[in-house]
Image: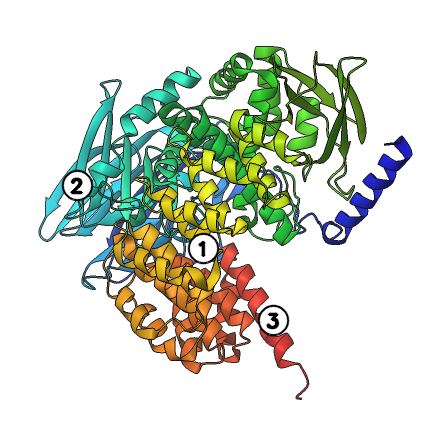
Amino acid sequence: MSKLRRRMLAASFSLALAAPASAQKLPSGPDHRIRDRAYDLRHLRAELRVMPERGRIEGRAAITLAPLGVLSRVELDAIGLDVSSVTLGGAPVEFATQGGKLRIDLPEPAGPTSSLELVVAYAAEPEAGMYFQPDRRDPRRHWVTTYGEGGLHANWVPLYNAPNDKFTSEMVITVPEPYVVISNGRLVATTRGERQSTWHWIQERPHPDYLIALYIGDYERGELAPAFGEIPLAYWVPRGRLAEGAHAFRNTTAMVEFFSERFGYRYPWSKYDQIVAPDYPVGAMEHTGVTGHDEGVLRRPGEAPDEFGPPLFDRVSDVWSAEATISHELAHHWFGDDLTCSDLSRIWLNESFASYLMMLWDERRLGRDELLWQVERARRAYFEFVDREHVIRPLEWPRYEKYGDVYQQEITYFKGAAILHMLRAAVGDGAYFDSLRHYLETHAAGNVVSEDLAAAFRDAAGANLDWFFADWIHGGGAPRLEVSYVYRPDRKMVDLEVLQVQPLVEGQGLFRLPVRVRIDTAGESRTETVWVEKDEEHFLLAAEEEPVMVSLDGEGDLVARIDFAKPARELLHQARHDALPGRMRALEQLVARHPASDETQTALEAAQGAESFWAERAEAARLLGAVRTPAARALAERALSEADYRVRKGAVLGLAGFGPAAKARLREVVERDPHADVVGTAIVALARIDPQLERGFLERQLARGAWYDEIRLATVLAMKELARGDLLPLVRGSAAPSFNQAVRQAALEAWEVIAPTDPELHAALLDAADGPIYKLQIFALAALGRRGVESAAPLLETTAERNFDENMAVLAREALAEIRRLGSAPDR
């Protein structure tokens, strides 16, 4: 093919991409930077009486701080606190509260050598940061949890609410019996009184405001083997669930020791507690020495899927397993809790690292293929997000509307983890882990910016990574490579061409990439690294005979889309012999390009062999649904007998591709499979291929018990797919407060699809938006805007104006704008 012809094809390919890709954009919003500080907060002591049944706290906060310059006024963050007095050194001082701030006038200016001891007496009924939730099973019992990211703790205690200051803390908390209090650090004392108890915790290693923990509930405590024989490890679960906690957290000791040894930097906190709360506001949250989890983490052997929280019924597995979530939150105790990003625009230094460390734990526990599969799934999730949302922001990005935007999972967590894996591959394990140890040691207990990490690689490994940080930390998007080759027998060379064909839009340009190329011939296999830097690259690579396979990035090092069309015979070799990501790509290309070929059938059958990695077996079973031959259906049905439930789940997804012909077999799965995740997947699959799926069948599924109400959740999602009016009573019933937040949100989603104008739906959304379950509040605010519910305007106005939670305030403003837009439309 001539060079001109190749350029014409590349240009046409780029133009074909340009239609959807031209909408790619960088997020916009106010410019957030590291906050200026007027003082150094040294110590916070909160002495509070907490009334769980009233959602109220009363008491005082003693704050020790040192001015960084000359101060005549001290300003603390205090959102909605009812402050009754402020004293300095025991003497009353003037103060005022306005706009979420507590402004304290000093009787005389104080300079940098001063130490100020302020005591703030106050009461509060927090609407964010601290959450009061009635128990679903016993309304007399409540759970109190905390979540502080985004400055939310200022809703219940006056402090400095940005991550670029660290201080020690004490919590002296009085609660009614039989409640238990858990906080950071070590438990100093527990004092029992008449129908109440006081718990005194102290955190002696400095930490930022958002990592303060306070959990209150009817908890039982279980102990794990101490790490290194001396670091106490425990878990706290709702009474009666100790066995589930013991199973869920059984590997924590090994995790603490593994991360300590892998980075040569020992776990820095005095203890580690893991706490489980029903309907936790987020999936999980790392505090210093404490992690809060939603109850979806609890399980008994064989009872639950690997996934943490609500299972997914449209894919074989999720990035977030329960084990991954547990290790992710623990990993933050190095990256995030000890070394803390200086502001939220750099939150990748916390979240991308914790996301990659959870994959490192799986590598240690389950092997190299498990790591490669985790990275591959993260990479795929990122590209699915870009295709859906067209957002390509860099990992470090200061312009956002609300703090939740920088926690965008597919970018900050998944792409970030894949980028850290790519960096590991680029520099090698020795330089990688030596540099991270140096980074941890240099910045222990401090704040960090991205440049600190780059400097650690320069200092410890002599690696100048300016090019890498420019492309992957400060640059957005990812490359798309179009690859082809010809063999030159006269030169005994593979002539490899690599084109960068991603659209050149703002925030995304050409990339510099170290790329591993593997060449297999009948006699040998060899790998070498080439550097792709321009939009068109050519490489001549030695090969004594014509290759049976040329694989580019078969190890899956790159965060890149790779289009490398190959004949079926080469893909068959790749599906058997490449590294895991290359094998998976070969299977997918065989199915997409050669669905009827013998090679495709052979490759899918071989991938389901007993010696194959579990994800290969499961994904091969799923891909059978795209082949849709009688032989493929027989293979899918055979996979329903596999011992690994994930392979059976893949077979269910594959059978769904055969349409109505698979109905009878899928119903058998629903009735007979022993694993609720497989059952749930089959229920949702049936709804997608059988619009007339009978109500009686669905009612029977709703009545079945399962871990985390998984079968009910799947049935509600099936009713959302069916979108039939006769199912509305069943959907409404699943929105009741007696069910967990995942089931309730799914029910509201289904209700919105089936009866979007139903006044009862609007009332339910209003209740949820004003209710105690944070995730349901977030969902309901957006839904009220989508539906144009005019009666929601007063609640939305209050939520927007009070601004107790930036996420909710922005959502409320957006919902109000949508209601007004819809209300201004002319009558038709």
Residue 481 horizontal side relative to residue 578, left or right: right
- Quarter occupied by the C terminus: bottom right
Q: Residue at x 46, y 60 (%)?
A: 778
Q: Position of residue 679 (x, y in %)?
A: 32, 55
Tag 2, which secondary structure? helix
For the residues labelled 1 and 3, say whether their Cβ atoms are less than 8 Å apart.
no
Q: Position of residue 793 (x, y in %)?
A: 52, 75
Residue pushed farthest right? 4
**Number of numbered discs:** 3
Amino acid type, residue under disc 1 in the picture: Ile
Q: Position of residue 691 (x, y in %)?
A: 45, 71
Badge 2 or badge 1: first in the primary sequence:
1
Amino acid type, residue under disc 3 in the picture: Glu
* Residue mark closest to the camera, 3 vs 2: 2
Q: Which residue is mark 2?
A: 243
Task: Please tell me which residue lies in front, 460 or 176.
Answer: 460
Amino acid type, residue under disc 2 in the picture: Ala
Q: Is residue 588 visible?
A: yes
- Quarter occupied by the N terminus: top right
Q: CA distance from mark 3 to mark 2?
A: 48 Å
Q: Is residue 333 visible?
A: no
